[in-house]
Image: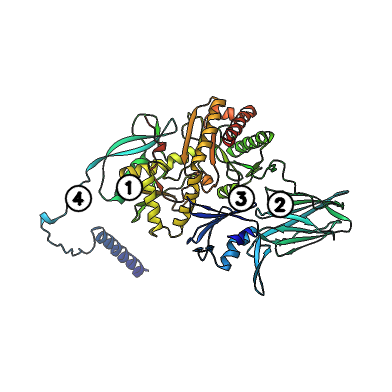
Amino acid sequence: MNWRVALIAVAAVAAVALLVWLLQGGTPRTVQQEAVPVQDIPTPTPAPEERIILLFTGADGMLHPELRSVPLPKEVHDRIQIVMRELLAGPASSRRLAPVVPYEASLEAVFVDQDGNAFVDLTAPPAPLAGSSTELLLAYGVVDSIILNCPEVSAVQILFGGHEVATLTGHLDLSKPLVLNKRFIAQS
Amino acid sequence: MPILELVGAEVKYSLSAGTYGVVSDEHVIQFAIDHKVLLVDGDLIQAHETPVASPGGVAVSLEYLERYLLSPLGHHLEPVPRGYRIVRGARFADPVAVRPAVADFEVTTTLVLTLDRPTEAEVESSSSGMLTVRFANAMPHLDGSRPFRSRRVRSLTSKEQTVEIQLASGIGLLSWHALEGPPRVTMELGPARPTPTPAPVRAPVVRRTGPRPIVIDPGHGGDDIGAQSPDGLAEKELTLAIARRVARTLESRGHAVRLTRDGDQSRALTDRTALANRLEAPVFVSLHANASTFSSVSGAETYYMSLDSASDEAAAATADLENRANGSADERSPLDLILWDLAQAEVLNESAELALAVQGRLNARLGSRDRGVKQAPFVVLTGATMPAILVEVGFLSNTSEAQKLIQPDYQQQLADAIATGIEDFLRPR
């Protein structure tokens, strides 16, 4: 019996010792540090702030522009990400405006092909949407906001949940990229 | 192309569209020299070869002629010693499932053949007590899974593009109807009369009194309820109610009308336009009710097709099309788009006139907020080969407007305005 108690005690002491050693960081790792002259380290240049135009749904059932200054990178893919992030965040002004995407949505992916067609993948709506007005303002709010701020983009196709859709509420043809359409932007 | 004139088809060349149109009864085929894509009754088809220009007009292979030009018109080629002869009955017909049901009454029997897709059919009777249901462009497959017993119908057999029905002695065809929703052919059978095959009687609401019915499309239907009012009024119910009123109003004024649905059925958007194309409707009007994020938004508006290049975006869209035509994007779509766009361009101006006429009448009649005439690339208007509009009669998301829309009187006012607008457009100018 005694030798068993002694064995358990030795094991317990060893376990505690191992734990202490692990908490202290284990064996010191050798880190090979390469000497880099300070002046050669690339410093990220913040993107210059630019005024972008975003379109939101107004109480008259039309799109209304809102100007916003944000750091806007040069690369078109990144620009679209920024424009969409701002668009989905919703209007900042005090006027009666609402986001064009009328549900909690995020940008899942962006792709721009060589012909200037941008494909933006949004979260699918949690429940069916209705009305041609909802559909038109969502589509052209996104399409126009991207094209107006990204001159390299000539057309935008919106995907939902990673899928192409023929239409969202049964009216507008969303099966191919849409070009700029200012008809739904309020004139005032 | 005299060969197509042999089967009673008229061939027209559209200089602006650069396409040939073959028109026969309710069929329209559009094709173009050196293009593999063609339109058959509103459906885009990709052929394996192209028609080519020849000194005598247009040259196509025998297979192209039979498959794409003769078959849709219900004919095929049969080899004879010194060439071919054209025979009635399409060879390249798609299958259609036919489910028969029968009910014997005291004096008559009703026989219903329910089809799994809309298919043109005619019923002929012969003196030998045999009925032949002839499908213009489909190969029927009889569903024999259900028991079929009748004292007046002996047997049903499918044979090529027909279903042959052997009747009991002394029984004949009294009348037949081609109906929709679901697509079906119904036959009234009873004591034989010494009369020729009766003319088909169409469904009451979709009866055709003229050769080219106005097509009214009640938006949504089936699982697709569309928008909904705070009180639970579904857009699909409202559009059907108004469409029926428009149909009755127009019919009472002597017009033939056809509805794309006359019940709570799902209909593909492209099928709705295809029906109008097939019937060569003079006008296609799709009826909808709207919804908005803001409940304050109200009023009626009328849309006609936008090619998304119709105005200030023309250059961008043209470039887009050219890029696609160069094969740099979707390989299948450039010609489809161009053909559609060419067809659309011809009727765009007329669609705008129709939209203005209907919206004008709605404004004058309703006193609701005029949201005007607009353009949008709506699927249901895409590919319509006639003046086509989509009318949004009001916003169901607006409580007070929804309360008006549910009222039969208001629905009739809407129907009167829409019908009068259509008449304004159709009236010779």
Rounded to the nearest whole Å, what is the CA distance between mark 3 and mark 4? 63 Å
- SS class, disc 4: loop
Is A130 positioned to the left or the right of A59 in the image? right
Kindly report the distance in space between the C-alpha atoms of the residues bearing marks 1 and 4: 20 Å
Residue marked by disc 3: B278
Kind of element beneath mark 1: helix
**Which of these two is toward me, A39 or B146?**
B146
> In the picture, residue A149 is in which quadrant?
top left
Q: Amino acid at mark 2?
A: Arg
Instruction: Give amino acid for label 4.
Output: Pro
- Depth check, front residue: B147 or A152: A152
Check if mark 3's residue and mark 2's residue have beta carbons within 8 Å: no
Tell me how far mark 4 sits from mark 2, CA to CA. Answer: 70 Å
Q: Which residue is mark 1?
A: A80
Residue type at numbered disc 3: Arg
Q: Secondary structure at mark 3?
A: helix
x, y (%) of residue B80? Answer: 67, 72
Where is mark 4, residue-wise?
A44
Q: Are marks 1 and 2 in contact (CB under 8 Å)?
A: no
Please report contact status of discs 1 and 3: CB closer than 8 Å, yes or no: no
Chain containing the residue with disc 2: B
Q: Which residue is mark 2?
A: B184
Question: How dense is the environment of label 4, judged by Cα within 10 Å: few (below 14), some, or many (20 and up)?
Answer: few
